[in-house]
Amino acid sequence: MRRQASGPTRMRSLEQTFPMGYYLLEYVLVDDYLARRASLREAHLALAREANRRGDLVIAGALAEPPDRAVLIWRTKDRTVVERFVDDDPYVRQGLVTSWTIRPWTVVIGDEPPAAHLSPG
C-alpha cells in the first residue's frame, strides 16, 4: 500500500513537480488615481510590459466602477520578482498606491493541473 506524503515533504514534492507558482498582487489606489496617473502611466506600463515580455506577469489591470484597485497576476518561481516590481513601480513610489498585498494563488481551473490531481498516484 502506497502512502501519500504530507507536510513539508509533500510541499517539496509539489514544488519539484510544479516549480512555477501564481501570485496575485493587489493594489489599493488613491481616490484621485485617474487624475494623478497621467505623468506616471508610461513608466508604469513599460515596467509591466517588460515583466509580461519575460513571462512573469500574466495579466494586469485596474478594476472599474469604482477605479479603486488594480490586480496583477504573476506566474513565477520566485515571489521576489513581484516584490521587485512593487519596489520599482512609479505608482507605488509616487503614492498612487496606498497599500498592496502579494498572495500565493492556487489555480484550480486554467493552465495548472487542478489541485485534486496534485496528489501522487
Image: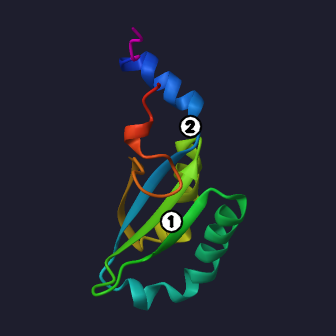
Nearest the eye: 77 or 12? 12
Residue located beneath label 1 in the image: 93
Toward the front, the furthest residue is: 1
Nearest the eye: 115 or 102? 115
- The answer to whether residue 5 is above or below residue 86 is above
Q: Residue at x 42, y 91 (%)?
A: 35
- Is residue 71 within the magenta segment? no
Q: How is the image coloured?
A: rainbow
Residue located beneath label 2 in the image: 18
Mark 2, Cα crowd under 10 Å, few <14 / some 14-19 / many 20+, is: few
Place of residue 38 in the rendered image (x, y in percent of width and height, measured from the top left): 53, 89
Sequence-first disc among 1 and 2: 2
Quarter assignment of residue 54: bottom right
Q: Amino acid at mark 1?
A: Arg
Q: Residue at x 67, y 58 (%)?
A: 55
Toward the top, the furthest residue is: 1
Place of residue 26 in the rendered image (x, y in percent of width and height, measured from the top left): 38, 62
- SS assignment at label 1: helix
What segment is highlighted magenta in the picture? 1-5
